[in-house]
Image: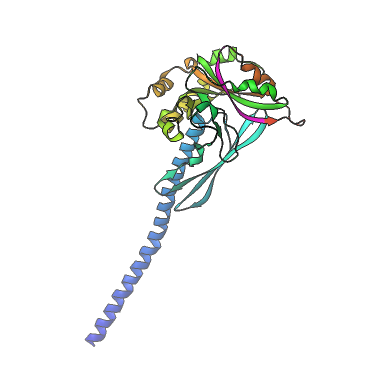
Amino acid sequence: MLDNALRRAKWRQRLMMAATAAIVVVIMVPLGYGLLNKLAARQSSALVAQLNAYHTVAEPNVSLSSEMLANNTSFGGNVVTKEYKDIDGYMVPWGTFSSSYTNLHWWMDDSFTVQTVAGDQQKPFKRQDFQPGTLQKIARFYTGTKGLPNEARTLAQLPNHVGEIAVTFKRGYTYPELKEMLPKNLNLRWAYLFNDTAHAAVAGDVDQPKIAEAPIGMALSDGQTPPSQVKWWRKALKLHWTGAKANQAYQYAMKTPADRLKFKGVILTGTTEHLAKVATAEYVAGTSVGVTVPRVPYITPRK
């Protein structure tokens, strides 16, 4: 009888242990699942914030079409970004990018900064850069002011098109000065402040010192002005340009009153006939042609 009692006690102990284990599983699995979801959500939010900062300060005349989560699980997923360029009322696809995140890390798509290069890379002004996904030509700014290309001149030979150009100035101009001097028959889309030396080595600026491979600036279209956006623009710059807080250009952008910021260049869009005339302006040090699009009768250019 003692043996039977011991066996029954052992069975009760095993049953209790099994019941306890089942209760632990029932409680811990949802908690673990919730924790994984929370960690993944934190990383996806950090990735989206970094992407938004990049869009705000480092993409000349690029507009966001959509930004959506894809393959979203408790262990990670992707943020798919689709972009376009507004070329005087013509919407041109620019690129589709897929950035990734896990429970512990996030990564922006490398294609944001990678460029397809054609031409002689040993001669900076002989090469041309294209967007990898769509092979649209990239309008480039320059870090110098002497002996620069003036590609806008060639647009006089391309009638019945709309396009964009990057204009590098001989000196910096404030936003009020830009509004006064730039042609009224062109769209001011974006303004260039300085080159991002923190990311330049990745983009190749070490090999091509006169080309601003990683320009930093702000959108100045659709009623946007430096004073109207400078607060959140600086937050975006701070998030984007980590590790370079002592940089002189960074400090200038963060501390100078918005209406006194001096821009080294601009992105302009309009008809090719009007853009070609900018090439002869006295304030122009150099120009680079970006996207050009044939005009069609059912879309009227804005200017």
- Snapshot colouring: rainbow
Nearest the viewer among 244 and 168 is: 168
Q: Tag count in the figure? A: 0
Nearest the viewer among 104 and 90 is: 90
Q: Can you see residue 142?
A: yes
Q: Residue at x 66, y 23 (%)?
A: 155
Q: Can you see residue 81?
A: no
- Location of the N terminus by quadrant is bottom left
- Does 182 sit above or below residue 76? above
- Location of the C terminus by quadrant is top right
Query: Magenta part mainly helix, strand or loop?
Result: strand
Residue at the right extreme of this rendering: 297
Corner quadrant of residue 66: top right
Image location (x, y in percent) of residue 15: 33, 74
Is residue 133 toward the left or the right of residue 75 in the image?
Answer: right
Q: Residue at x 37, y 65 (%)?
A: 23
* Residue span colored magenta: 282-292
Residue at the bottom extreme of this rendering: 1
Q: Residue at x 61, y 17 (%)?
A: 279
Residue at the left extreme of this rendering: 2
Image location (x, y in percent) of residue 29: 40, 60
Is residue 177 toward the left or the right of residue 160 in the image?
Answer: left
- Does 145 sit above or below residue 11? above
Image location (x, y in percent) of residue 156: 68, 21
- Does 267 sit above or below residue 17? above
Image location (x, y in percent) of residue 125: 53, 26
Nearest the viewer among 162 and 211 is: 211
Tell me, yes or no, whether the highlighted magenta stretch contains residue 283.
yes
Tell me, yes or no, whether the highlighted magenta stretch contains residue 49.
no
